[in-house]
Image (tube, rainbow, N blue to C red):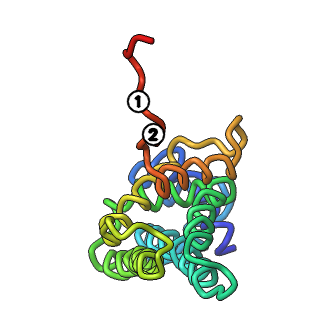
Amino acid sequence: MRDKIINESIDLFDTKGFKETSIQDIVDNIGVTKGTFYYYFKSKQELLKDIHLSFIVDLLKRQEEIIGDSNKNNYDKLYDIIYLIISRIKTHGKSARITFREMRHVEEQHLVEIKRKREEFRLNLEKLLKEGITKGEFRNKVEPDILSFAILGMVNRSYFWYNPDGELSEEELVKSYNEILLNGLKNEEPYTQGILH
């Protein structure tokens, strides 16, 4: 029943928003009483905290598995981490949107742990970038801390616009991101636009 409450809440928070969704809305949609809700959660705030933590803890676990793979270089690990985030749009897109959109509604007492987990994910990425620079896999002209923020900012926004059932596949999107990140926008071919031949 706990999972059922969480899943129904995720659907409602995604469509109506956290603030506009009442506990009564949640229990009505499931067909149980408020007593059932309070058996599993002290409040709607605790429920929101659990949705946030469940999402980020699972991502962290999978990220650590990728980073710990001694058979892959940092270039491939970066690809896999980006793919990890993008591939979860199809299966966990609603949870992700709630995690980013409803953060402002999380009470301060719950924010500390959530922010710590999110920072851990970013620092893991920063460490990977540093190691890649040290090993000569990435250019040494970039700041790993700034780049880690930039990567997550770009990739995480995909939860709000990317349709995994659309024309662009997950693999194509990840390849596009990696092309931008790893090769940049600069055209190595001579720039000829506007030059008369």
Quadrant holding the N terminus: bottom right
The residue indicated by pointer 1 is 191
**Quick check: 108 left or right of 154?**
left
> How far across and down, in percent of the image, does residue 125 sit?
45, 75
Q: Residue at x 62, y 54 (%)?
A: 89
Asked whether disc 1 touches disc 2, contact meaning CB atoms under 8 Å apart, the reply is yes
Instruction: Give the residue furthest to the top.
Output: 196
Amino acid of disc 2: Asn
Residue 109 in sight: yes
Q: Which residue is drawn at 46% across and 62% down?
A: 99
**Quick check: 75 left or right of 196?**
right
Mark 2 surroundings within 10 Å by alpha-carbon count, few (fewer than 14), some (14 through 19), many (20 or more): few
Residue 114 in sight: no
> How far across and down, in percent of the image, does residue 127 sit?
42, 81
> How far across and down, in percent of the image, does residue 24 sit?
52, 57
Element under label 2? Answer: loop
Element under label 1? Answer: loop
Work out whether residue 169 or residue 139 is closer to the camera in this orientation and state it.
139
The residue indicated by pointer 2 is 187
Q: Which residue is drawn at 69% across and 58% down?
A: 91
> How far across and down, in percent of the image, does residue 156 sit?
47, 56
Q: How far apart are marks 1 and 2 (CA)?
A: 8 Å
Amino acid of disc 1: Tyr
Instruction: Give the residue furthest to the left.
Output: 108
Q: In which quarter of the image is residue 196?
A: top left
Considering only vertical position in the picture, is 134 above or below 52?
below
Work out whether residue 67 or residue 1 is closer to the camera in this orientation and state it.
67
Q: Residue at x 31, y 80 (%)?
A: 112
